[in-house]
Amino acid sequence: MQYSTLRLESRPEGVLLATLNRPEAANAFNTQAALDLIDLFDSLAKPGEHRSIVVTGAGERAFCAGADLKERHGMSGAQWRAQHEIFERMFRAVLDCPLPAIAAVNGAAYAGGLELVLCCDFAYASRAARFALTEVSLGIMPGGGGTQTLARAVGERRAKELILAAKPFTAEEALAWGLVNGLCPPEKLLEETLAVAARIAGNAPLSVRQAKRAISAGLQTDLRSGLALEIEAYNALIDTEDRREGIRAFNDKRKPAFKGR
């Protein structure tokens, strides 16, 4: 796949590296960037050669600065709403992706850039990264899921402080509050994130997808309903070739060769 705003690289073990590639605009989303991300993540819905995806930004300055406000300048209300519907589809495509999606936050993740991080399953950040949801300082508000995903990540009261004050925060604060899973030196960020993605990709792909689905769906309901979702996902794996291969490999004392079926 070729995109004008994304750079894709297939890595060993079935890892896909997707780089937001508009460094001259701090990797901000214009309409084409949103359409490219929708197409990419929709293409990953069915099992294929890739088993996990890492999302990062080109350059060292920014992961993503959010929506491209230069493109938005002068838009009518109708044009703004039409574009934002595309952005909404973009964020949903990331949230709905069955593959594990990991953000490697290499610089500023502001506004929609932070919302993209929050739509991924988890994230690692450069120690130089910075974060903010700045929308209320511009006369709008988070519209890419930020009021929901940030509150779920860091708690209601802290999310209200960060969103209502449009308050930037550091990578160290993001780690302490549970928004990112780890911090890396800038020069090691991609290497360490890709290593985690490769470890995930080395596991049974159907099992990974089912486990991700059970976690994500289960957290939106009560415990007993979540447990029922888990067993439903578990039972779907019993008759798979990967389940049989995993048990054979364990008893043969070798690495399993999972095929995703």
Image (tube, rainbow, N blue to C red):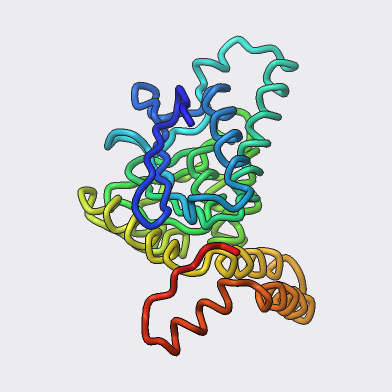
Q: Provide residue 212's location: percent of width, then percent of height.
A: 60, 65
Quadrant for residue 241, please give it: bottom right
Residue 35 falls left or right of residue 53 = right
Q: Is residue 65 above or below residue 78?
A: below
Q: Is residue 133 above or below residue 87?
A: below
Residue 83 falls left or right of residue 163 = right
Q: Is residue 67 above or below residue 112?
A: above
Q: In the image, what residue occupies the spot 78% across and 81% down?
A: 224
Q: Provide residue 117's location: percent of width, then percent of height.
A: 49, 48
Q: In the image, what residue occupies the spot 57% across and 79% down?
A: 244
Q: Provide residue 158's location: percent of width, then percent of height.
A: 54, 59
Q: In the image, what residue occupies the spot 32% across and 60% down?
A: 195
Q: Provide residue 82's location: percent of width, then percent of height.
A: 72, 22
Residue 131 in view here: yes
Between 58 and 9, the one nearer to me in the picture: 9
Q: In the image, what residue occupies the spot 54% across and 29% down?
A: 36
Residue 160 in view here: no
Between 255 and 185, the one nearer to me in the picture: 255
